[in-house]
Amino acid sequence: MILLLEQNGRLSNAELAARVNLSPSPCLRRLRHLEKTGVIRGYHADVDPVAVDRGFQVLVHTDMMVKDQSTIEAFEAAVAALEEVMECRRMFGDPDYLMWVATADADAYERFYMTQLTNLPGVARMSSQFTMKVVKSRLQGR
């Protein structure tokens, strides 16, 4: 059931029930239970990044100069407010953070880097890696 929903979150209950060999009522109960218990966290649209001017994707490695609680909280709050940051993960080891940034193109990324990323609190250094080609993505090709 989970794999089917990951592949297509818009399946109707009747279609999902047929695919997992259940009648609609027990299927719906199982689905509601998965939602209630947090196994299913939500349903999302797979948006083409190019269509919304986010086709240039960059992986940004960030090392912190200052690692006290207030600096970390300020950094994370500032990153959370940046629309171009699609994902940010605090890491064990090096780097301290990995961020996926998406902009329209290299020029837009350079502007974002110079006006936003360089002003984040507590940062010692950042390095950027640009995607050459997406070989596999769980969200791609649905």
Image (cartoon, helix red, strand yellow):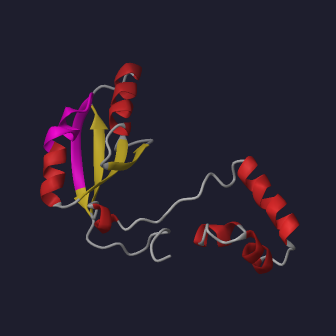
- 66 or 49, which is in the foreground? 49
102 with respect to 29 (left or right): left
Q: Is residue 120 magenta?
A: yes
44 with respect to 125 (left or right): right
Residue drawn at 65 percent across, 68 percent down: 5
Residue 37 percent location from the top left of the image:
74, 47
Compared with 18, 43 (above or below) is above
Q: Which span of residues is magenta-colored?
A: 114-128
Residue 8 percent location from the top left of the image:
60, 71
Res. 50 image quadrant: bottom left
Residue 124 percent location from the top left of the image:
22, 34
Q: Quadrant of the N terminus?
A: bottom right
Residue 123 percent location from the top left of the image:
25, 33
24 with respect to 60 (left or right): right
Residue drawn at 83 percent across, 78 percent down: 21
Res. 95 image quadrant: top left
Q: Is residue 94 magenta?
A: no
Residue 94 in view (yes/no): no
Residue drawn at 19 percent across, 46 percent down: 112
Q: How many marks?
A: 0
Residue drawn at 75 percent across, 69 percent down: 13
19 with respect to 56 (left or right): right
- 73 or 61, which is in the foreground? 73
Res. 102 image quadrant: bottom left
Residue 57 in view (yes/no): yes
